Image (spheres, rainbow, N blue to C red):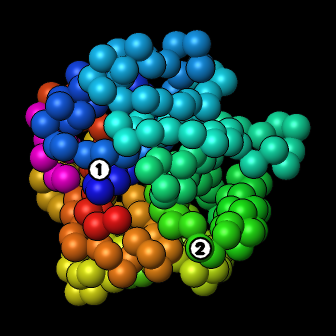
Amino acid sequence: MKIATWNVNSLNARWPRVEEFLTTRDVDVVLLQETKQRDDKFPSDALQELGYSSAHFGFNQWNGVAILSRVGLSEVVRGFGDREDEEARCIAATCDGVRVMSCYVPNGRAVDNPHYAYKLEWLETLRLRVAAHPKDVPLVVGGDFNVAPEDIDCYDPSAFVGATHVTEPERTALRAVTDEGLTDIFRHLYPDDVQYTWWDYRNGSFRRGWGLRIDLLLCSPHVTNRATAAWVDRDARKGEKPSDHAPVIVEFSL
């Protein structure tokens, strides 16, 4: 099975790139973030024509998450349901016996911004959901975590001093999630590889290699122990009108 996670930064703007990805990459399950669509605008019919069942959670032109699957899709849960003003940042489903979650962690904006505290609270809620998950059911939690787990995941840590995405509280909150029995599969398989998943559109950042690894696939032991490869699909960041994120893919045997 292959599972991918990808922040598409607007499904309307990126639909040709998503369609190309689905028809050329042979991926079974795709976790999307930042679709920026309401549920009634989501292209479920077009996805079905491509062989993918889908579930989406979105309210407006902000946020939005989805799961696409060609190996079955059931037991869909949209959101955490823990606050009245919940944003469309998490969706879960079961695909061929594997429970998957597509997550779009809040950006945080700035360390002194209320959104930073919201980000830490959101990660704690995610930790509680992971902790409650049955240990005998394979789990993959993927998405845009807006946290670079280690300095190796940032092109220049000194450029981010005092900024979000690299602070110790964010990294601690992310480690608390993985401490519930999940493994950052890319870093597990390739402990010394320098790979990024996001590059700013400005200043030629992609060409210069100025990136962050913030898109992650966190896997339970059932998946981790059977994983044969994981990679960043940099080609999806190239060409015409790309997202500023590249997909991350894991391949494992069931």
**Which amino acid type is marked by label 1?**
Pro
Q: Residue at x 17, y 43 (%)?
A: 25
Q: Residue at x 51, y 67 (%)?
A: 138
Residue 247: which numbered mark, if any?
Answer: 1
Q: Nearer the viewer, residue 188 or 153?
A: 188
User: Label 1: few (<14), some or many (≥20) within 10 Å?
Assistant: many
The percent position of residue 234, horizontal first and vertical second, equals: 17, 52
Q: Is residue 5 left or right of residue 142?
A: left
Of circles 2 and 1, the one toward us is 2
Q: Is residue 184 visible?
A: no
Q: Give the quarter of the image for residue 253.
A: bottom left
In the rendered view, tell whether residue 97 sits above or below residue 77. below
**At numbered mark 1, what does the secondary structure look like: helix, strand or loop?**
loop
Q: Nearer the viewer, residue 18 or 48?
A: 48
Q: Is residue 234 magenta?
A: yes
**Which amino acid type is marked by label 2?**
Asp
What residue would you read off at disc 2? Answer: 136
The percent position of residue 227, horizontal first and vertical second, equals: 29, 73
Distance from disc 2 to disc 1, alpha carbons, whole Å, reads 28 Å
User: Label 2: few (<14), some or many (≥20) within 10 Å?
Assistant: few
The percent position of residue 142, horizontal first and vertical second, equals: 47, 57
The percent position of residue 28, horizontal first and vertical second, equals: 31, 45
Q: Is residue 219 visible?
A: yes
Q: Residue at x 44, y 39 (%)?
A: 72
